[in-house]
């Protein structure tokens, strides 16, 4: 893909939906899929699906659909999850422990390379075979494993200082679970994950359901 092509963020987000669906189809031993099939599976229109793929060249053959394994591999390459990537996790509390236990890491070729915390009672303990390291070792470990992605599973009061340290250590992509807006330099991308915000939106939708289409 040419570096000059600017792909809209919503299209990239939909690609992650497509690849999740394709992984499920592969596990079910489905060999081929059409854009109409993908619309049924993902609730994204067939036309939008084809448009999203068009940003990245030719996929499939007109009238014959797509081979599931090949399409999954192509989208994985677009998202740069076709090879293992090292991830640093800061925060070994309940949330961090739950993230470590998530079973889907290997499907997306992510690997938690190291877990950090500042709490002396947590440092030195083990979570599912991951030794919790002192955060003072963050820069050293980041350099040794070549990580570019970091996850913040820390309280809001600590999030900005932790983000600053991760950026200083060469991390250019952050997942932030703390309920605070991070300030980062240009060239660093932050994805905010706010569970309670999603619940608030859902609350409105539950109490004010949309009118059914006629």
Image: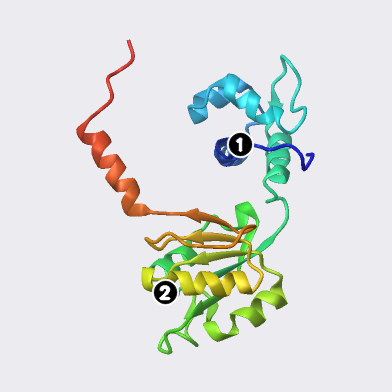
Query: Mark 2 near mark 1, Cβ–Cβ under 8 Å?
Result: no
Q: Earlier in the sequence, mark 2 or mark 1?
A: 1
Colour pattern: rainbow
Is 73 placed left or right of 211 in the picture?
Answer: right
Identify the residue shown where x is 71% and y is 70%: 146
Residue 66: image location, x then y, percent: 70, 26
The residue wearing badge 2 is 158
Q: CA distance from mark 2 to mark 1?
A: 32 Å
Q: Residue furthest left?
A: 207
The residue wearing badge 1 is 8
Question: The N terminus lies in which quarter of the figure?
Answer: top right
Identify the residue shown where x is 29% and y is 40%: 202
Q: Toward which corner of the image does residue 95 lie, by quadrant?
A: bottom left
In-front residue for pair 62/188: 188
Residue 79: image location, x then y, percent: 67, 46
Disc 1 element = loop
Crowd around label 1: few <14 · some 14–19 · many ≥20 (10 Å) = few
Q: Residue furthest top?
A: 214
Crowd around label 2: few <14 · some 14–19 · many ≥20 (10 Å) = some
Q: Toward which corner of the image does residue 208 lie, by quadrant?
A: top left
Disc 2 element = helix
194 shown above or below 92: above
22 shown above or below 104: above
Is 110 placed left or right of 151 in the picture?
Answer: right
Is residue 204 at all visible to an observer of this figure?
A: yes
Is 102 placed left or right of 167 in the picture?
Answer: left
Is 26 placed left or right of 180 in the picture?
Answer: right
């Amino acid at each position: 893909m040419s570096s000059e092509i600017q792909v809209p963020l919503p299209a990239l987000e939909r690609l992650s939906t497509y690849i999740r669906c394709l992984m499920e189809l592969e596990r079910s031993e489905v060999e081929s899929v059409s854009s109409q099939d993908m619309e049924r599976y993902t609730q994204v229109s067939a036309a939008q699906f084809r448009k999203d793929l068009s940003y990245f060249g030719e996929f499939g053959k007109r009238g014959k659909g797509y081979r599931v394994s090949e399409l999954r591999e192509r989208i994985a390459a677009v998202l740069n999850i076709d090879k293992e990537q090292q991830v640093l996790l800061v925060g070994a509390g309940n949330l961090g422990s739950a993230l470590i236990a998530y079973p889907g890491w290997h499907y997306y070729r992510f690997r938690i390379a190291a877990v950090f915390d500042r709490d002396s009672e947590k440092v030195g303990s083990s979570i599912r075979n991951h030794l919790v390291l002192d955060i003072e070792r963050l820069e050293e470990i980041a350099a040794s494993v070549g990580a570019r992605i970091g996850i913040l599973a820390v309280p809001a009061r600590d999030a900005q200082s932790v983000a600053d340290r991760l950026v200083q250590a060469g991390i250019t992509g952050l997942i932030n679970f703390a309920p605070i807006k991070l300030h980062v330099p240009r060239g660093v991308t932050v994805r905010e994950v706010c569970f309670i915000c999603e619940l608030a939106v859902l609350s409105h939708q539950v109490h004010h359901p949309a009118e059914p289409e006629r």
